[in-house]
Image (spheres, grey):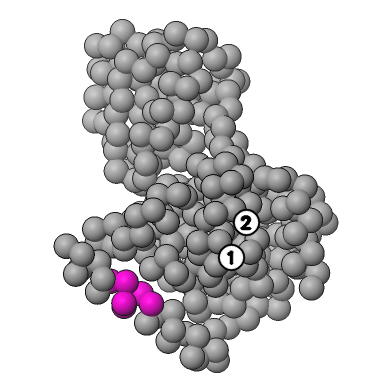
Amino acid sequence: MLLASSFYASVARERRRWYARRPDWRRRLERPVVSVGSVTVGGSGKTPVAALVARLLQVAGHRPAVLTRGYARAVPSGGVTVVSDGRQVIAELDHAGDEPLVLARQLPGVPVLVASDRYLAGRLAETRLGCTIHVLDDGFQHFELERDVDLVLLSPEDVERPVTLPFGRLREPIDVVRAASAIIVGEADEVQAARMGQSVGVRDVFRLVRALDRPRRPEALAGSIEPATGTRVVAVAGIARPQQFFSALEAEGWTLVGRLAFADHHRFTDADMTDIAAATRAAQAELVLTTEKDIVRMEPLGELPMPIAWVPMRVSIEPVEEFEAWLLERLRT
């Protein structure tokens, strides 16, 4: 078991070294690039952080674009898919992918582009959409593109159990994190975060804080729902770490009488909706709660056969003012 993970780690480390020895293989966009990435597979919070960084840059007077891969799209394209041109969302789920579609909805005024070739997407954003800076979603392993700032999300588990795939969660050995400009630590207090920075050899350390917002109805129904302590709900999640979502709902006071977990990026079907509705009735639940990433995969099915709402996730990078000042100063220099 450990032998397979050790082999994977050596291959991943050599890939990083290969690109480091060949800087001419890495292309540079005309505008700066801020990468948000991690060393783990799924569930680290990269996409919400990419959205937060894009908003921060927008408020600071930049015209950001988000460049993303669009993992698990039903209809992949060999070129660039413009999910949002900054004025409106112009790509549907099958062509955009769930996470890019969520980003496009969350970021009015910010173009969101999907492509395996992020350089090509960035050039289109610069020349046709007038963007002055790029946010590279899930970019720490995308060596083909030069970055000006590398933000890496990390959790205590990543450092305490640094096992690579296929028997761990790490995409690369933990020691590669020293290449980051800064780490953003989730699920840790200030003391833990500082220790993790020392452990991986990164000086600039910030903390990721997540919290659930009020549930919202799908767009067809609109409006938000006031949390009611003790309300019986069925929780549905097709994300990388569904248990985190379930636990967060319970912490907010919801009474979970059912938990339905699907694979990350699961494409919901009419049969799935029928099963969820049946589970809701059987549990005598008043409501189904799901994630924003899941609701965009449910909406194409039309009217859903049960009362449902999605729960936004709010994130902040703390200390807030210190992080903003640090990032903008890095970009100036």
x and y percentages locating residue 48 in the rendered image? 56, 46
x and y percentages locating residue 308 in the rendered image? 43, 21
Label pair 1/2, CB-CB below 8 angstroms = yes
| Res. 297 mark | none
Which residue matches tag 2?
A: 205
> What amino acid is labelled 2 in the image?
Val
The Cα atoms of the two marked residues, 1 and 2, are separated by 7 Å
x and y percentages locating residue 169 in the rendered image? 33, 56
Magenta residues? 8-13
**Residue at image coords 55%, 67%:** 201
Q: Main secondary structure of the magenta part?
A: helix
Which residue matches tag 1?
A: 202
**Residue at image coords 38%, 77%:** 13
Q: The N terminus is located in which quarter? A: bottom left
Classed neighbour count for the residue bearing mark 2: other residues with Cα under 10 Å, few (<14), some (14–19), many (≥20) = many
Q: Image height check: is 93 above or below 231?
A: below
* Label 2: element kind: strand
**Image quadrant assignment for residue 273:** top left
Visible residue check, residue 102: no
